[in-house]
Amino acid sequence: MIRDFMLKDIDDIMCLWLETNKQAHDFIESSYWDSNFTSVKEMLPQSTIYVYECDSQIQGFIDLIDDYIAGIFISTDNQSRGIGKKLLNYTKEKCDKLTLQVYQKNARAVQFYLREGFGISKEQMDEESGEIEYFMEWRGA
């Protein structure tokens, strides 16, 4: 079931955020994610978040700032089960266009977004991490 974020979800959401960032971005020092944890936890409730929940367990979420996807985060043991696609499709129903940035080295995510209709509009260097990232866009019909 997909539902709106509630403040009581914040600790579960942040555990997912940290776990999945470290897993998906193993080319970045894990200390980078640890050092950003507190600021993300403070900022996250200000964005739009949709949570995927099953049996009272949060298995994933999508984080939006207007039409910008700050990330899709799926628990490690629930990846490749269609949850990310469900969250993305739910969001597409609410937006005419979506944008995001994804690290070039995160090949699994790049392929996911390409498969889901996003196109790469530019490539740039992320100043904080020193990694190349793609700026990707999707437009509804």
Image (cartoon, rainbow, N blue to C red):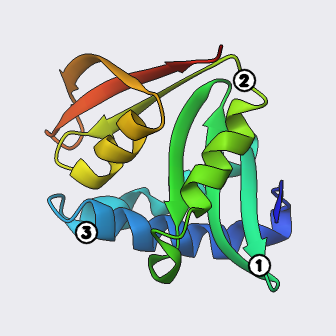
Q: Residues within 10 Å of mark 2 (few under 14, many from 20)?
A: some
Alpha carbon distance from label 1 to label 2 = 25 Å
Q: Name the foreground residue: 115 vs 25.
A: 115
List x then y, in percent, for residue 115.
Answer: 40, 39
Circle on res. 95: 2
User: Foreground mark, 1 or 3?
Assistant: 1
Graded by Cα atoms within 10 Å as few (under 14), some (14 to 19) or many (20 or more), the crowding at tag 1 reads: few
Q: Any mark on residue 54, and which?
A: 1
Whole-angstrom CA distance, mark 1 to mark 3, is 29 Å
Find residue 92 and name its label: none
List x then y, in percent, for residue 122: 26, 15
The residue to which callout 3 is attached is: 30
Specify the quadrant of the image occupied by residue 29.
bottom left
Q: What element carries label 1?
A: strand
The amino acid type of the residue labelled 3 equals: Ser
- Against 85, residue 13 (above or below) is below
- In this rendering, the answer to whether 55 lies above or below 26 is below
**What residue type is disc 2 on?**
Cys
Q: Which of 33 and 118 is in front in this view?
A: 118
Q: Which quadrant of the rendered structure holds the C terminus?
A: top right
Question: Residue 99, how many percent across, how many down?
Answer: 50, 24
Amino acid type at image mark 1: Cys
**Residues at badges 3 and 2 in contact (C-beta under 8 Å)?**
no
Observer able to see residue 136: yes
Q: Is mark 3 on a helix, strand or loop?
A: helix
Residue that appears at 71% across and 67% down: 10
